Image: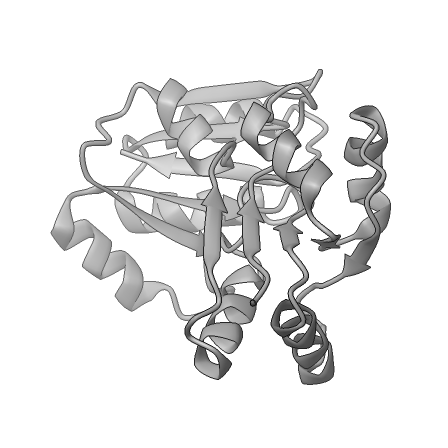
Amino acid sequence: MFGDLYIVATPIGNLEDITLRALKTLKEVNFILAEDTRVSRKLLMHYEIDIPTLSYHQHSSDSKKFEILKMLLDGKNLALITDAGTPGISDPGNELIDFILEKEPDIRIIPIPGASAITTALSVSGFKAFNYIFLGFLPKKGNTKLFEWLKNGKITFSFYESPKRILKTLKNLEENFGSDIKVFVASELTKMHEKLYRGSIKEVTEKLEKCVLKGEMVVIIS
């Protein structure tokens, strides 16, 4: 009998933002696949979870994928976690799932839902989110056609951005969408220094220029 692969969402900051089902799963699997075992160890130690961890990240080779597949074929139950949030959202978890299902479609992939930075930010943005587009990380170049498409669609869109690029990105957005467009930026979500900025893109940019920016940010454009 094949083993199961559980896709387990972990906290995006505050360690208490994890489900009971996620904790139960992490305690019962044979191995935990972690994006960075050093980061994941903090969570596992906090909840006294003593399960062996293996590294799986965006630079993992095909041989690592085959190693994981063999463990599942041998009946081992595995949990895949990312450093923060839900695996497969802007990380290589979806590549692993695709690889496994291509090789053996009968292996069960079981989602254990939980925290996600994008839905967390949308929930407090105050923007209409009946329909929205999530773009992951914006391309560093060649955004003109993308921005034109987004303007024509007139729909809320969101993406992740690094603190090093956020001001440049906001300036680029202002040039393409105008200074009055409404924007929401969330920094350090659920952590001690959580900051939420909302207003016109010009107003938010002015606020951010006065801050020491840290951590991955979520940007929402209304």
Residue 11 can be seen, yes or no: no
User: What residue sits 28% from the left and 33% below the top?
Assistant: 181
Q: Residue furthest front?
A: 1
- Name the image quarter holding residue 21: top right
The location of residue 161, given as percent across then percent down, is 55, 46
The location of residue 65, given as percent across then percent down, is 66, 76
> Quick check: 81 above or below 206?
below
- Name the image quarter holding residue 70: bottom right
* Frontmost residue, 60 versus 121: 60
> Quick check: 167 above or below 55?
above
Q: How many marks?
A: 0
> Quick check: 7 above or below 69?
above
User: What residue sits 56% from the left and 69% below the top?
Assistant: 96
- Name the image quarter holding residue 50: top right
The location of residue 2, given as percent across then percent down, is 56, 67
Q: Residue furthest top?
A: 192
* Frontmost residue, 204 versus 100: 100
Q: Is residue 143 left or right of residue 28?
A: left
Q: Quadrant of the N terminus?
A: bottom right
User: What residue sits 56% from the left and 51% below the top?
Assistant: 6
Q: Quadrant of the C terminus?
A: top left
* Frontmost residue, 68 versus 160: 68
Residue 95 can be seen, yes or no: yes
The location of residue 200, given as percent across then percent down, is 35, 26
Q: Is residue 152 left or right of residue 192?
A: left
Q: Is residue 184 left or right of residue 168?
A: left
